[in-house]
Image: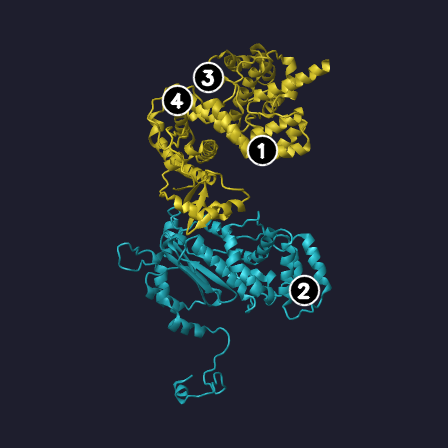
Amino acid sequence: MQVVRCHRISSSNDVVVSTLPLYRSAPPLEVRLEDFELFAVDRLRVLKGISDGLSRGKKPEEIAKLAMDLWKANMRYPQATEDVNKDNISHFVLRLVYCRTEELRKWFLSMETALFRYRFHSESSEAQRALMSEFNLPYKAVSNAEFESVKDKLVQVARSMGQTLLPADAIFYKVPFEEVSELVAGRRVFIHKGHAYVAMNQVVSIVVTQFRSHLSKALILTNRKWTSTIREQEKDRLTPIVEALCTSYLGPDYSQPKEFAEISIKDIDQIAKTSFPLCMRHLFEKVREDHHLKHGGRMQLGLFLKGVGLKVDDALAFWKAEFAQKVGAERFDKEYAYNIRHNYGREGKRTDYTPYSCQKVILSTPGVGDHHGCPYRHFSEENLRAALARMGVGSRIVEDVIDKARNRHYQLACTLTFEAVHGSSCDAGINHPNQYFIESQKILQSKNGSMAQ
Amino acid sequence: MTKDEVENGRDDMLIDGPEQANAVPDGFNANYLRIYYGKLFPHADIFKWMSYGNDGKHPACDKSYIGRREFSFTLENDIYIRFQSFNSASELENSIKEKCPFKIDIGPVYSVDPAKRHAYAQSGDNVFTPVERELVFDIDITDYDDVRYCCTGADVCLECWPLMTIAIKVIDTALRDDFGFNHILWVYSGRRGVHCWVCDGKARRLTNEQRAAIADYFRVYQGNENSNKKISLPGHVLHPFLARSYTEVLKGFFEAKLLSNQNLLSSEERYEKILEMIPDAVAAELRGRWQEKKRSSMLKNDINVVRWEQLKHALQSGKQRHKDYEDVLKRLSFLSRTLGLIWRFRST
């Protein structure tokens, strides 16, 4: 990168240290096993926040701000030096997690590149310049004299784009025009004899492209290493963590129902109609209809009901009342009751027995005779339309929901449904069936409360 | 003239006199094509050009290079054969003489000899792929049909050819001064336009995206007959490329030649197209003046030039900057059609 300056910058005593790592190589640090997972989870919150913002169609400035807020909230340490370690470690752990399939790689690449772009933008210009030289772009520096000779052309280009003047400390870089195709195409740079004179703010796009291309190659290599050696070597230690991480849900687990703890069986039909998300509503209807559910359905609905506040005795009574009609009371007691008590009796942090998040529900694969999983994913369009109509969703919104589902934005589809059914918006977006339930109850309670007055 | 005629010093030149024994018929003739390939076609030069120095003896030669270049022939009866390749000038020459193609196209240089492409396609790694191709621009005079009134279609005459000259000068200057290319060949395409071949190594190795960027760099004109103001030039200050094109080429040609040659302001139908591009108030005033004087008493001066001066004056009395801006709009409306730039990078 050839640097063309228009001001001599006075040397300062401060060493400009950029806190934005380029992740060129894994840091030679020791990491505690719990930090291995925790750091990655924190970083994942940031990446998923960005992903969410993008798929909800937020404006770029909004997403940038969101990203930086999430970064501050999740990735900061009291000591600045620790920040960098966490930054590096979390990135490299997630590389392992997200290198394993084409789709995962694509997602990770997009989110990390976006994050890098936002962070780069928010760095000081000195830090930005330091970063750029780290990219090892093989261009030599030139003298100030050259800047003077092209200055009027640079001003002309700036003005042609509607910018008033070059800022006082404007810095330009001279690169082969092939490196900045987009800028050339839009006539946003002055080019001469094959070189483009690129303004600092335009440089960001060059840098980000380099970052992306490097990470893309690195992910392929990581995948090879993972498949050939790491996965086997670490099968008792890191591998289970890595494999669980990309499907991990990052919000509250709703395993300990708090406020709405008192749900009794007689309320349940009513509540199912008003406050269950479609996935649980469907399972519930099927239990009532068929007096049976296969294992996947029992787990998904059973744990949901536990999160909703159904006590263990009521749960047993509910399931027995249905199943006994099909298999008889004795068989129920023998084969099914134990598992229900097991779900309730289990304590501790095993995620298997916490109510399923949307992510988990979406990822499950219902087979023949199953009714679990996410209906926005598995229902035919016809069935989905019918189900939404039964929930009272207006036909125009049904089309929106169908569209989201078609584009595989299942949670957004569910959020739209929630908003339509309750007549109010849900900015946070639905990512857990129990969250749907709680939000729904909140709205209904407040309506009842105001009516009671 | 025959040797006898020269020696006899004939004063009156009878060139196509009836007593000429071998009369040359008009039109294309496959026999003449055969003779052309036999005696005139520069086989060796073409081969040398396409080799780009790899036919020499120096250590950096890539012996496989020329054999990886695709040629395609269109034979009699429109038979089209692709993926022809040659390892020596004599192979190329013999093939052309034998097949007598009505048209020869030069394709890209591939990663492997096109004749062997099937072997590589099966490996599944997509190894047979183009790696080099000249940057080629194709400009047709028909791209300018909405601003030339003397000819249509494939016809060209001295009045409208300057449009082509403008395009050539603007593009050639930009390719050399802006993009730094040096090895540029401009050639008449044979019918109604020109081709520009940029042969620098850097040009040959450009990606599709980079080629598109160069074409976009030239683009000013968007849209078609349906949109009104089709030229987008934001701001009053022009990018140095546009400014230079205006000052060095467009302005001169417009005022000296095109204005008059094409009678751009002589009739209502024609001047309306230009009035459309300037502020309504000014246009209305001019329109009023021109509609009245159907026949100007000042026939000595070309009516187009006269009206053009009136137009410039009218705009000038507004904002100075406005004048330049609008002027350029008109000029560049002609330039714009170079954005029928079609570069050719044929992929598999």
**Amino acid type, residue under disc 4 in the picture:** Glu
Query: Residue A257: in sight, yes or no?
Result: yes
Residue hosting label 4: A82
Q: Colour of chain B?
A: cyan
* In the image, residue A395 above or below residue B5: above
Helix, strand or loop at disc 4? helix
Question: Marks 1 and 4, Cα distance to the nearest angstrom?
Answer: 42 Å
Residue kind at label 1, given as amino acid type: Ala
Label 2 crowding class (10 Å Cα cut-off): few <14, some 14-19, many 20+? some
Share a chain, discs 4 and 2?
no
Residue A41 drawn at (x, y percent):
45, 23
Give the number of the disc on residue B267.
2
Name the N-terminal-most of marks 3 and 1.
Answer: 3
| Residue at the farthest bottom position | B8
Q: Which mark is residue A405?
A: 1
Image marks 3 and 2: residues in contact by CB distance under 8 Å? no
Against A8, residue B306 (above or below) is below
Please name which of the two marks, 3 or 2, marks the residue nearer to the observer: 2
